[in-house]
Image (tube, coloured by chain):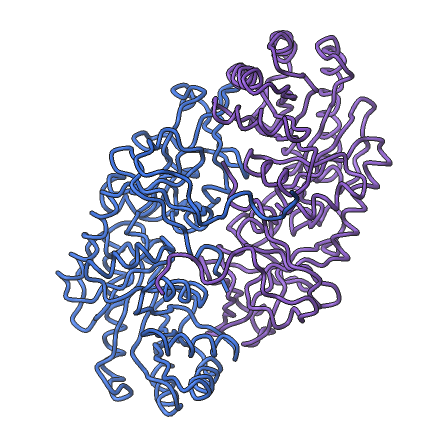
Chain colours: A purple, B blue
Amino acid sequence: MTTDHPSAPRDAPETAVGTSVNVLPTPCLVVDEDRMRANMDRAQAYADAQEVRLRPHAKTHKSPALAREQVARGAVGICVAKLGEAEVMADGGVHDVVMAHTPYGPDNARRAARLARRIAFVVGVDHRRQVEDLSAAAEAEGATVAVRVEVDTGAGRGGLAPADVPGFLSWARERPGLHLQGLYTYEGYTYDAPDTKALFERHREAQHRMVELAGRTTGAFTQPPVVSMGSTPSQTAGVPLLDGITEIRPGTSIFHDAAQAWLAGGLDRCAAFVVATVVSRTGDRAILDAGSKSLTTDARPAGVCATRGYGRIAGTDVVLTRLSEEHGVVEGPDAEALAVGDRVAIVPNHICPVVNLFDHLTLARNGRVTRVLPVASRGRTA
Amino acid sequence: MTTDHPSAPRDAPETAVGTSVNVLPTPCLVVDEDRMRANMDRAQAYADAQEVRLRPHAKTHKSPALAREQVARGAVGICVAKLGEAEVMADGGVHDVVMAHTPYGPDNARRAARLARRIAFVVGVDHRRQVEDLSAAAEAEGATVAVRVEVDTGAGRGGLAPADVPGFLSWARERPGLHLQGLYTYEGYTYDAPDTKALFERHREAQHRMVELAGRTTGAFTQPPVVSMGSTPSQTAGVPLLDGITEIRPGTSIFHDAAQAWLAGGLDRCAAFVVATVVSRTGDRAILDAGSKSLTTDARPAGVCATRGYGRIAGTDVVLTRLSEEHGVVEGPDAEALAVGDRVAIVPNHICPVVNLFDHLTLARNGRVTRVLPVASRGRTA
């Protein structure tokens, strides 16, 4: 038989519950169930203590099953980056989804309006064209589309400058078919803070801007506005939240990674690993079967979340110093301790795009597989 | 209905032939059929002129359909990096596959031996443990497994030092169930050559080492050995090949990318594009809906293949200066020419891991879809 399809369906995991993780073909993505649950609990406990709603970003795990578990533990719903992700989450039984990205165009606006008829769905906006499209689609579909306005508090990515927000809100509130729900920001620049003190200061400054802006624009909203902060480091570091912040959207903290975990004092919270095998030893090098197609080339050379290399072998200070697409290299004295056939668990620098490279998350407890979850919204970038 | 599966099967493309690429949801991966075919023809013409066999590396496209087209145009077979890729290619009607990577362990050796009973399959080796496993598996499965020995000509990745090869061959030839087919190297260090002259010199040096080594070890082989060189730049730059080199394994040249195309004098050969939409304009920035989950963070800051930024907008000198997972940013004066709603074709820095992020390759001619191919071995890293 000749077929262009893979020999087994992508979403039909063949790994039986109870299988030892030591016999899984490598590279594979293994999640420690207990650490993951503890991470979920920590995020919820932080949100509860700070009296804000938790809306985890599902870009990290891309699994409706894990999103449902986050909601079951107290999260108000989840956050996604793309319409395709939102659709997969809705199909997977997640009924409250915020898209912290700004879709453009009539076709995407129609998809958003249709989704808004199925679930509680909120879309980010930061430009009049997006709002006009969503308004027209809402009217055409007989839907009300809830929107949040993105505010640039310093990341220099999406979002309106704070000074432009009041005028934008006054204009947007007159568009039919829409419900203005609040304001959100992505304070990702905190990652680059030189130390924890600077991280706290930067985050506090971002919060101040958001609270001040929400106070000035309350009249634009029919209900008290959502005021939402993103990014994991503030949660991990335990930054206190000001009165007036109503929601947080950490993503990475469900798994953590080499960059984020240092804020918690070490790698003990890291729950997701790329398990790889030492396939060769040549010269002073150990060659692993995981490269950039398993680990990405994401690096974080500076700041409070700085990491070395391209992934760290769990339980050691050893990092992969070079990656090709399917080769990882450990060099010099670090390679001495690695023998051909050794299996190692690698903590990635940045777990979110790593999950996106795999078809499945293999969850395990005490070295035995507990369940295998499809990375259901993998590749749903559109 | 609640399901963890995506709402549509991954391998059931919904895009009709004839659809304008201007209406495809973005980001998407679009391949110019005519440029791709011209690139295939150039690779074959170079191999023919140099009197070597062409064995394209399928890691770039991960599509059995395109592999079959490469074979139909004269390629001797294809090359892959992983057993999972080899299996998908075999399922897809490709009957001559070399794995230019060294699998470890009894389970993988058994997979290799089974594949060797179905198709002409050759495995890379550079360590005795690999050879012992393959020999045992070949005997157990009643197969003969062909192997090639990897030689490190300077890449410092896998491969034996040339001085160690003769002894290794003498030992390996006595293992039952195996057929020693030849030698191969990966001369990826040519990418970092400071200029084209240095690229030529480095490549010629690598060829000399391989030819010399093959001449010294002919006695280990029952037939004239395959002597195989990898990497695209030498093909693109047209490096002359020495007598004694019998095969080349370029991968990227089917599509090219921002790094490789400069060796051909410009981006005119680039056949694969990430099509993205300008979803917002804020401050002096244009925000695109393609980030590192569509483009990767692969960069090439130095050498003859150097690129700036994280992808170049086709037909311009504009590059994306920053990426988040789902955002791409163009900053400063370059953003002036970009309006919300504009669709742009981005030439990635490194096309191979980009293809690996998408479920489908959408092929087009004159702006109309000609066919949609699954990226069938995407995620088959194990």
Residue A115, image x and y in percent? Answer: 60, 29
The part of the image, by quadrant, that contains residue A167 is: top right
Number of marks in the image? 0
Residue at x 44% of width, y 72% of height: B102
The part of the image, by quadrant, that contains residue B24 is: top left
Residue A100, image x and y in percent? Answer: 62, 30
**Side (left or right) of A99 relative to B73:** right
**In the current view of this chain or complex, which residue is farthest to the left?**
B49
Q: Is residue A221 above or below residue B262?
A: above
Q: Is residue A283 above or below residue B91?
A: below
The front one of A251 and B115 is: B115
The front one of A245 and A25 is: A25
Q: Is residue A18 above or below residue B233?
A: below
Residue B280, image x and y in percent? Answer: 50, 22
Q: Is residue B230 above or below residue B274?
A: below
Residue at x 42% of width, y 79% of height: B113
Residue A166, image x and y in percent? Answer: 65, 10
In the picture, the quarter occupied by the N terminus of chain A is: bottom left
The front one of A202 and B110 is: B110
Residue at x 69% of width, y 50% of height: A255
**In the current view of this chain or complex, which residue is farthest to the right?**
A49
Residue at x 20% of width, y 47% of height: B38
**Side (left or right) of A216 relative to B222:** right
